[in-house]
Amino acid sequence: MSDIINILPDSVANQIAAGEVVDRPASAVKELLENALDAGATRIQLFVKEAGRTLIQVVDNGCGMSDSDARLCFERHATSKIHKADDLYAIRTMGFRGEALASIAAIAQVELHTRQRGNELGTEVLIDGSEVLSQTPCNCPEGTSIAVKNLFYNVPARRNFLKRDSIELGHIEEVFKRVALVNYTTEYAFYHNGRLLYDLHSGNFAERISQLFGPHYRERLYPVDEQSDIVEIHGYVAKPEFARKSRGEQYLFVNHRFFKHPGLSTAVERAYTDLIPDKHYPGYFLHLKVDPARLDVNIHPNKTEVKFIDEQALFTILRSSVKKALGQFGLANEMEFDRPEEINVPPAPKGYVPPAPQVHYNPGYNPFASTSGSRRASNTTAPRAADSRWTSFFDLPKEPAAPSEETAPTLEMEMPSTPPAPPTTGEGGCLQLQGRYIVSTLPSGLLLIDQQAAHERILYERFLQQQQHPAAPQQLLFPVNCQFSPADADIFTELLPDLNRQGFEIGSLGAQVFVVTAVPPALGDTDLQPLFDQMLAEYKNAMLQKYADRTQCLCRSLARQKAVKAGTPLQQAEMQQLVADLFCCTMPGTSPSGKKTMMILNPDELFR
């Protein structure tokens, strides 16, 4: 029997490795940006065309490569970052595995131009699907320029898997933010289809956050600064009032590397306990400095998973640091810092009600009373004698004596002799239970309705109908300007036709700023910037599903944000109208997200 085991060619092995290292254009962007940082670049330029399908090019002013290194860097496990196994426990560079360039070259057409400092000529290397076409001297600036063209051209299934350009550009923008945020001493420029999206100058952490998320963002943040023997923590956390329903603006870095860690993310969120609503998540930008020997970043090829030796201690320190930052600004209820002794008064006994303030006056005073009966008018110019009775108004009754211990008032509240009667409903009336449920009667039993889920269903179908029959817009007295990031601005432009059919009137004031002059009547005086931010976040998450419907995603997001929330008290007429509108829907039993809107309890269930 002949041998059946053979060694795969390098080109095939590289394509297999590319499945883990490069799964979309954003992955290639991440690897190229990190290589530029490891080369010591102080300015990095990123050029992207058609969301990375056609071109991804990174130009840096780093140290450059020699002609032999320029060829060798595309071999598997070829790296300048480590030399022996012990180096894995002292990693201070972004890359170290030596797989990225080999994987990218296996699934794209690559052009490399590089020149070391002091050399007169550089090197040009052309590669097509792991095959080196040529290597020649060339004239190029100091540093390295690597262009990745036609990504996945020889892997059609992977190329067909890519989403629309706006979604893929959003992923590239997210990777760009992760790299640029913590490396704030490096200058960056990001171009898409020839349009400049970001031009970042060097500065500090707060300035970089403002450059990426807008100048208004600095007002939303509190600084965090903590040092211990295990970790140094620097960064910013968002104020509780700016918590969102998505986890979009959460960034954890360790030794200038972005990473994801559910445990440490939970530590930050627990610091916000009782400060933000349920199912809301705070934003944060936190950089941890840890001894490289006490963590392992060699978990996955994407290098976003990290293991810590002191994970439990890090959890406690991180949570306490964030809670301290919130407490110093008077926002944490569970912690108090350096409270003066003079205000440490004991709490009042349970049930104590302070007495109502009283105004003392003389009830016997009458300014119109006369001792001589009636006053006679006088035409004389002599001054009228002063009436000294006005002083009697200030004759206050004497203060009652302080009660003795035997006669001191009790602190218990006086309760009525008979309990109040429970609320009742008339014919067809409704009750609100716990500020969340609407209770009504049916011939078949008791009807229990979730008011928020029901209102979402009503608004969702109403917004869908407006796509076919646009509603008359409600003009705003003062136009509202809304600003987005470059990638979000492209998505928002894509949504403008659907928004206009909903009753919005939106114009453009530039590449990233839009002006709203009219809104649908259902929105009223809603704050538009948070509404659009949440709508874009939900839309991007929904569009990750290949066959998601754009119109339905938009209507579902608007309905979820405008629906009456649990805990909102409703009047009798409002509850009856909501019940009537719900039963006019085509699918009254479920909300747009699939949650049940109602439950009917028959007499047998009530009896049990």
Image (cartoon, rainbow, N blue to C red):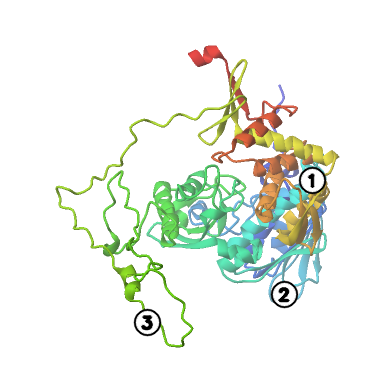
- Residue 347 lies, with reference to residue 457, above or below; the image says below
Is residue 30 in view from this perspective?
no
Q: Which residue is mark 3?
A: 385
- Give me the disc on residue 502: 1
Q: Position of residue 484 (x, y in %)?
A: 71, 58
Instruction: Work out whether mark 3 precedes mark 2 in sequence or the reverse, and give the earlier one.
Output: 2
Query: Which residue is more in the foreground, 316 or 441?
Result: 441
Residue 119's disc is 2
- Relative side of 360 to 602, left or right: left
Task: Give, as a three-letter code, the residue at label 3.
Answer: Ala
Observer-side mark, 3 or 2, equals 3
Q: Nearer the viewer, residue 3 or 53?
A: 53
Across and down, in percent, residue 607 comes to 49, 13
Q: Residues within 10 Å of mark 1 (few under 14, many from 20)?
A: many
Pair 1/3: label in front? 3
**Which residue is the extreme one toward the bottom?**
381
How far apart, in angstroms, are the residues tagged by discs 2 and 1?
Answer: 61 Å
Which one is in front in this view, the residue at disc 2 or the one at disc 1? 1
Counting residues from the start of the chain, the first of labels 2 and 1 encountered is: 2
